Amino acid sequence: MGSMCLLRASLTKYVLLFGTAIDTGGHSGRYWADIYYAIVLGTFRQWKEGMTRSEIYYPRDTIVQKSGDVMAVQWSAGTWIVEYGRGFIPPSLIFVLSDTIFSTQDVVTLFSTFRICAKAFLVEASAYFSQLAQ
């Protein structure tokens, strides 16, 4: 469980703030994008696939999850991070929203997230097509 504020989104990159008021964790997802996490407050622990030990990161640390990598992740209460993703973003939404669809069934958050992302994708697409028309 966490809270996020999407600052920028397009088909190929995004920037968001993520934070949690409680200890939480889960599966990172396996994306078609490189994800960069910059720790602002709190701690971030990850256990990468194939490793026997987890690693803990603290404020001012930056973690890179390369495209195709996967890991178990855990955030301590009060953790806030800036997350930057670069690659093909739309397939990432399937994983990110799967818990909302199949577990919590929080349709308000689901539709809000779809609306925000669709608007951002449409803005980028219209800018792209207007450049082609010139």
Image (tube, rainbow, N blue to C red):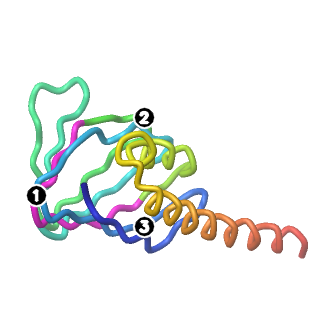
Residue beneath disc 1: 43
Residue beneath disc 3: 15
Residue situated in front as seen by the camera: 102 or 46: 102
In this view, the mark in front (2 or 1): 1
Q: CA distance from mark 3 to mark 1?
A: 20 Å
Residue beneath disc 2: 68
Task: Determine if the magenta segment contains residue 78.
Answer: yes
Magenta segment, which residues? 72-84
Q: Quadrant of residue 18?
A: bottom left
Q: Position of residue 29 (x, y in %)?
A: 37, 39
Q: Is residue 32 above or below residue 120?
A: above
Q: Position of residue 119 (x, y in %)?
A: 63, 70
Task: Please state, as top left, top right, bottom left or bottom right, where the N terminus lies in the image.
Answer: bottom left
Amino acid bearing label 2: Gly
**Residue drawn 32% across and 69% down?**
17
Chain-order first, disc 3 or disc 1:
3
**Residue drawn 11% across and 37% down?**
54
